[in-house]
Image (cartoon, rainbow, N blue to C red):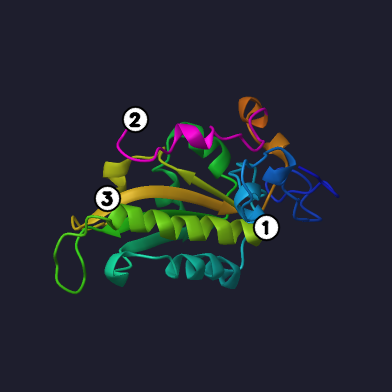
């Protein structure tokens, strides 16, 4: 990450908070076919500054999620969130596994994505509730990147405790969690994570698709 001025509200200089600029994925990755650069640039950093995110700025991410495609326009996704320094933060944070706590402690917001397993309009099963929630998550993540925020998805948390402690009804499936924050210096991360704080490459397209029946 490029750091114009060293700053951090959680352990470094508190007097001057300056948002860092994240590495763009296109600096390292190369697409085999032309695509929108935003898709190539987005990746999942972990280093965050601990700074607060304005509510309006956070709502832009949820607004992007709102416009994701879904079966019968069912919009099966829901999101529960906790902002740092609120009464909800400790409940959300303690659901994380220790490895994720080590860096997510500097997030501004923690988010749970859940999905309704039946349609609102007729209570019939929705076969694509997870698929459609994934589409909403993708919009959320891309909007966050466009706004210069760190958005990192996670499955490393206690799913059963989350259902109980967040009072999630049985008709909803707990899908995933995300940490959102302003970029921070990678030196704030545990040493082993500092080495991984860079965009990954992806496997070749030919390893993921085939024309016709299953042939992988």
- Residue at image position (67%, 47%) is 10
Q: Quadrant of the N terminus?
A: top right
Q: CA distance from mark 3 to mark 2?
A: 38 Å
Q: Position of residue 69 (x, y in %)?
A: 39, 65
**Residue 58 sits in quarter:** bottom right
Q: At numbered mark 2, what does the secondary structure look like: helix, strand or loop?
A: loop
Q: Position of residue 33 (x, y in %)?
A: 61, 46
- Residue at image position (78%, 56%) is 18
The numbered dot on residue 4 is none
Question: Does 155 sit above or below residue 88?
Answer: above
Contact, CB < 8 Å: mark 1 with mark 3? no
* The magenta stretch spans residue 198: yes
Around disc 3, counting alpha carbons within 10 Å, would you say few (fewer than 14), some (14 to 19), or many (20 or more)? Answer: some
Q: Is residue 83 visible?
A: no
Around disc 2, counting alpha carbons within 10 Å, would you say few (fewer than 14), some (14 to 19), or many (20 or more)? Answer: few
Give the mark, 1 or 3, whose residue is nearer the N terminus.
1
From the image, tell me which residue sits under label 2. Answer: 215
Choose between 17 and 205: the one closer to the eye. 205
From the image, tell me which residue sits under label 3. Answer: 163
Q: CA distance from mark 1 to mark 3?
A: 31 Å
Q: Position of residue 136 (x, y in %)?
A: 43, 60
From the image, tell me which residue sits under label 1. Answer: 148
**Residue 16 sits in quarter:** bottom right
* The magenta stretch spans residue 113: no
- Kindly report which numbered mark, 1 or 3, lies closer to the viewer in this rendering: 1
Q: Quadrant of the C terminus?
A: top left
- Kindly report which numbered mark, 3 or 2, lies closer to the viewer in this rendering: 2
Q: Which residues are magenta?
A: 195-216
């Amino acid at each position: 990450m490029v750091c114009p001025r060293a700053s951090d509200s959680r352990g470094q200089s508190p007097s001057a908070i300056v948002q860092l600029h994240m590495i763009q994925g296109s600096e390292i990755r190369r697409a085999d076919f032309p695509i929108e650069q935003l898709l190539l640039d987005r990746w999942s950093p972990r280093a965050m500054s601990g700074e607060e995110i304005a509510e309006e700025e956070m709502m832009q991410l949820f607004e992007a999620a709102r416009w994701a495609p879904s079966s019968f326009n069912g919009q099966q996704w829901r999101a529960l969130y906790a902002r740092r320094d609120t009464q909800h933060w400790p409940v959300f944070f303690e659901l994380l596994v220790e490895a994720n706590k080590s860096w997510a402690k500097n997030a501004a917001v923690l988010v749970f994505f859940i999905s309704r397993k039946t349609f609102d309009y007729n209570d019939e099963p929705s076969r694509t509730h997870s698929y459609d929630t994934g589409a909403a998550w993708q919009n959320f993540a891309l909007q966050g990147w466009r706004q210069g925020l760190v958005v990192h998805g996670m499955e490393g948390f206690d799913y059963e405790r989350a259902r109980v402690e967040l009072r999630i009804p049985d008709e909803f499936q707990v899908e995933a969690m995300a940490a959102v924050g302003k970029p921070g210096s990678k030196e704030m991360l545990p040493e082993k994570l500092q080495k991984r704080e860079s965009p990954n490459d992806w496997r070749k397209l030919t390893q993921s698709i085939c024309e016709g029946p299953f042939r992988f």
